[in-house]
Structure formats: C-alpha cells, structure tokens
Amino acid sequence: MLFAQNLPETETSGITSVLVREDLVSDVTLTVISHPYLDDLLEKIRGEAVPWSDYKGAGLITEDEVAMIAHVENKSSEEISSAMSEHGIHYAAMYLSLIHKLARVDAIQKVLILIHDMIHDHDERIQLFHEASKGKEGFPFTPFHRALHINDEFITIQSSKILTMLICSSPKQDPNINEFFRNITFQLQSRQAHTVELNIQILNALFHIPPYRMIFWDTLHAMNSLVNVLKRGSSNPQKVYETLFAIWLLTFEKQISTHLNAKYDVIPTLIDIAKSAVKEKIIRIVVAIFKNFIQLAPKSNLSAMLVAKLLPFVEHLGTRKWSDQDMKDDIGFIQTELQGSFQSMTTFEVYASELETGKLEWSPPHKSENFWRENASRLDEEGHKLLKILARLLSSSSPLVLAIACHDLGQYVKYRPTEGKQLLQSIGAKQRIMKLMTHEDPDVRYYALSATQKYFAMV
C-alpha cells in the first residue's frame, strides 16, 4: 500500500493501491490511483475482441503466448488466481515482453487490461514483474515508458498507472523518471478533468519517495503546471484535497519550501482555499503546508504570510473547536510564529515584504510622509532591488497595484530628487508612468499624473 500521513485524511475508494517504500509517519492509509472514467474505459475495451490467432499467423506473437493469454483473458478472479499461483512470474515476463514488442494499439490495450486483472486486489503480484526483470537492463520500466509514446488515451493512462506502481515498489530509481515527469507535466495541462485528476494521484504516489520530489521540481514547467491546477480550483473537494496533498508532500523538501511561494505566489491561494473550504480535511492539509513552510523556511515565508493576512485567519481558526489535538497544536504553532515575526518586523520590512509579493494595498506606509522621508533611499539597497520591483509592477493588470506603484515612485523621486530622476529614467519607469496617465482607471491616471509632476518638479 502507499504510505500517507494520517494528518490529512484520505479517501480510499477505488481499485488499485500503490506500493511505496517510505513511511512518513506511523499511521498510514491507503491511497489509490482510480477514476470512474478510467473504469468505464477499461470495461469498454475489455469487451472488444483481439484476433490473437491472426497476430500469431503474422508472427507478432508466439503460439505459447496465445495459449497463456487464453487461460486468463475474460476469466474469473479465481481462475486468474489459479494461473498466477502456478505461473505468475511467467505471466509477468510475457506481459513485459508483449508491451515491449507489440505496436498494435488494440493488442497493447488488451495486455494492459490483462495486467490490471492480474494485480487487481493483489498488489503483492507487482513484485513478480521485478523478479521477471532480473538481468534485463531498464526492465520492468522500459516497456511502459515506450507505451507512453503511443497516441492512445487508455494506453497512456493505464501505462502511467502501472509504471507508478512499479516505480514505487522498486528499491532502485527508474532511470527514465525525468521522461515520466515530462509526460506528467504535459498531462497536467490537459483540458480533460479526468486526465489531470489521475496524474495528480500519480504524483501523490511518486512524491512519497523523497528523491523524486526534487526531480519533479527541476522538471521544466512541472511546478508551474501543478500550481496552475491548484489555482484553477475545482468544485470537487476531493480533487482540491488531492492537489493540496501533492503540494504538501513537496514541501517536506527544504529547497521547495524555501522557493515555492517566491516563485509561484501560492500562499494567498492557499489561504483563499482554506477560507472557502467546506470539508475540514482541506483546512487541515493547508495548515500542514503552512507548518512545513515555517519549520523549514521561516525567513522565506513568514513575511509573505503576514502580508497575505494569514495571521487574522489563523487567529480565527484558533477560536474554532477541533477534535484533532494535532490540528490545535499546529494552528497554535503557526499563530505563535506569525505573532513573533510581526512584533519583530520594522515598518520598512513590512513594506518590503508587501512589495515582494506584488500584491499592493493602501497599507499605512504608502501614505506616510514620515515613512518616505526616512526610507526612500532604502529602495536603492541591494542594487535597487525594491525600486526595480516597483518598476515591474507598473506592468500589472491590477488598477490598484498600478495606482500604488505610481504613488510610491512619485514619493521616491520626491525624496531622492537627483539620483531618483536618473534611476527612474534608466530603468524605464518614467516612460511607463507617463503612459499610464491615459489609463482607463481614474485612480491610475491620478497617481501617474502626480508622480510625473513630482518627477519634473525635481528637474
């Protein structure tokens, strides 16, 4: 079975559990890779006959292989169990050989169904594929990687599912895991909900193996695709939960916890999901993610959490009654850490954190003359880091962000008359501000005009 942390409960309805080596905690639950769409597709294809004798005549398969198939195809689970108890390793070897050598879509589909029937409710039989692969380089993974290149939906889904079971039950790393993650990344961009949902389940299985988390993180467009699934949301709470579960597993890696929000701005999304959640388990998994963020990368996340107004939300969660003591403890831990961070932060640090998130609001520092008098020059620190962020925000699609960015740059040049004028010119901010004077939003026009007046008043 697939080990999964007990903190966020998982639902175990479905057809196939996945083997994995890592036990994250002592209490475990079954995780499945299953979907009604896949079940329906499997039964539809099962009813389609494959002319095995014709393929034997064409030299595609042998007479012995035809005979072995006849003993298990469309048979009862008892008949299949009898065949497996006697010849299980030979069937595993034959299935691997057929997937590897066959090119016909109908034949490969049927072999995948035969494998499904073999391992359904018998996860232990997956080990037969490993035993049958001894001495064969790349096996048992290679045949299924090959199948992923066939342009057929059922073959892609079922091969991915079986490949995941093989990977998660193997003491050795799949040499082509990078290729598998590239395929999953592509599947996550599908418009078909069932395709995305099944691939999220597959990731939940693979992410229980720590080395695979960083491999996925380093896969081009992989994290962006996964985060986009999270941000698109779903009306199905279980699908939201499964996506959050994948994110949670990733955050056990310090590097990922350090950079995830900085690169993909997930903290506001996570807060919104938890606020609108109907099911308690969704709140629990979001809290678990935040706990990992704080424990593994506090410097990278606490400020962003404060800017996103996590503290008042966590304080609200703390007033609710929770049956789970771990949940109470985690909420208390997050609240304590956020309060401590808030009390130790200077006004400028709060302002800088807000800029770095890109989600500007009319917080007190923006409108404080004293703040700008004391801190305008600090926008030039670290190679003008914050000044450049403000300049980039002039391309935002949000009228509120545009208005505040124009205002702040006007204040900057007011208190940095000589250097500020030159810098706004060199980084292209002056030109963008002047262009915004014709923006459709009246506030944007007003603050762009105000900033332009301050700029030229300093000439």
Image (cartoon, rainbow, N blue to C red):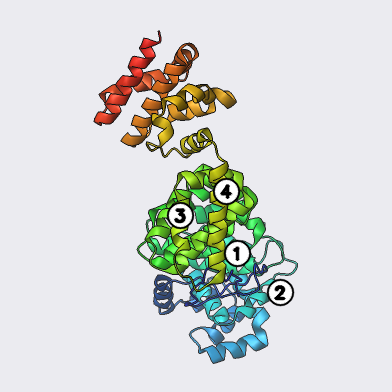
Look at label 1 and name its amino acid: Pro
Q: Earlier in the sequence, mark 1 or mark 4?
A: 1
Inspect this view and state whether residue 59 appears. no
C-alpha gap between disc 1 and disc 3: 39 Å
Cα–Cα span, label 4 and label 3: 22 Å
Identify the secondary structure beneath mark 4.
Answer: helix
Of tags 4 and 3, which is closer to the observer?
Answer: 4
Tag 2: amino acid: Glu
What is the secondary structure assignment of the residue under circle 2? helix
The residue to which callout 3 is attached is 270
Q: Evaluate if marks 4 and 2 touch, with contact meaning CB atoms under 8 Å apart.
A: no
Residue 200 x/y as whole percent: 49, 61
Separation of residues labelled 1 and 4 (CA atoms):
54 Å
Q: Residue at x 52, y 46 (%)?
A: 261
Q: CA distance from mark 2 to mark 3?
A: 43 Å
Q: Earlier in the sequence, mark 4 or mark 2?
A: 2
Give the mark nearer the N terminus: 4 vs 3.
3
* Residues at discs 4 and 3 in contact (Cβ within 8 Å): no
Determine whether 318 is above or below 400 in the image.
Answer: below
Category of crowding for the residue at label 4, using alpha-carbon neighbours closer than 10 angstroms: few (below 14), some (14–19), many (at least 20): few
**Mark 4 or 2, which is nearer the eye?**
4
Provide the residue designation for mark 1: 143
Which dot marks residue 340?
4
What is the quadrant of the C terminus in the image?
Answer: top left
Secondary structure under the numbered disc 3 in the rendered image? helix
**Kind of residue sitting beneath label 3:** Leu
